[in-house]
Image (spheres, grey):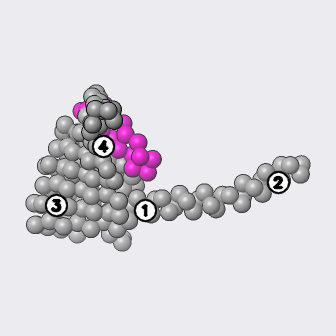
């Protein structure tokens, strides 16, 4: 009985630390989004903003570039819920670059879905496929019909 109480107390002591770390990680991933472009068409009734020509969207750790981006946001507070990017899509995060013809960012799920000849590069290593799903929070990729080119350090 005493052992069970001790284990329960230890769990409750560490629970706030684990929750705090998860919240900090989520805050680092999302952050504010700053978007620049040559043209903007806002539709407050539909809660969308269409950015066109040389579009760049930046968060604290992610940059998305495209010819066009349709941004969906919540009515109350204006938080971004989804971004649909098309035309020369390029996403940079850390040392990775991901390119495709189209990409959709889902804020609540913290994932990006790439279609249209998606290609992920990290240094000389390249992964391509018909569709790439990037799970940002866990830093995982799901690649359909993949082709992978890995170069050893000796080849570089």
Q: Which residue is mark 1?
A: 28
Q: Is residue 9 above or below residue 96?
A: below
The residue pinned by badge 3 equals 55
Location of residue 61 in the rendering, given as x and y in whole percent from the top left corner: 35, 59
Contact (CB < 8 A) between labels 1 and 2?
no
Categorize mark 3 by other alpha carbons within 10 Å: few (<14), some (14-19), many (20+).
many
Residue 21 placed where, x, y %?
55, 59
Residue position marked by numbered label 2 in the rendering: 6
Rounded to the nearest angstrom, the CA distance separating label 3 from label 4 is: 23 Å
The local secondary structure at tag 3 comes to strand
Q: Are marks 3 and 4 in contact (CB under 8 Å)?
A: no
Q: Residues within 10 Å of mark 4 (few under 14, many from 20)?
A: some
Distance from the alpha carbon under mark 4 to that under mark 2: 46 Å
| Mark 1 and mark 2: Cα distance apart in space | 34 Å
Distance Cα–Cα, label 3 vs label 1: 22 Å
Q: Dot 4 lies on which element?
A: strand
Q: Is residue 118 left or right of residue 76?
A: left
- How far, Cα to Cα, is label 3 from label 2? 55 Å
Q: Nearer the viewer, mark 3 or mark 1?
A: 1
Q: Quadrant of residue 123?
A: top left
- Residue 70, can we see it? yes
Q: Nearer the viewer, mark 3 or mark 4?
A: 4
Q: From the image, tell me which residue sits under label 4.
A: 122
Residue at 36% across / 36% down in the picture? 142
Residue 47 belongs to the span the image colors magenta = no
| Left or right of residue 142, residue 83 in this image | left
Quadrant in the picture for the C terminus? top left
Q: Circle 2: is it few (<14), some (14-19), or many (20+) Cα within 10 Å?
A: few
């Amino acid at each position: 009985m005493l052992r069970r109480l001790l284990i329960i107390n230890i769990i409750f002591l560490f629970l706030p630390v684990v929750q705090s770390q998860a919240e900090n990680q989520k805050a680092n991933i999302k952050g504010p989004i700053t978007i620049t472009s040559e043209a903007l068409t806002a539709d407050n009734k539909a809660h969308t903003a269409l950015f066109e020509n040389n579009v760049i969207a930046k968060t604290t750790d992610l940059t998305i570039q495209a010819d066009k981006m349709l941004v969906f946001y919540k009515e109350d507070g204006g938080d971004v819920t989804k971004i649909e990017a098309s035309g020369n899509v390029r996403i940079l995060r850390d040392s990775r670059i991901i390119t495709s013809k189209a990409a959709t960012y889902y804020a609540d799920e913290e994932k990006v879905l790439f279609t249209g000849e998606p290609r992920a590069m990290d240094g000389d290593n390249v992964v391509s496929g018909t569709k790439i799903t990037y799970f940002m929070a866990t830093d995982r990729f799901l690649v359909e019909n993949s082709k992978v080119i890995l170069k050893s350090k000796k080849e570089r």
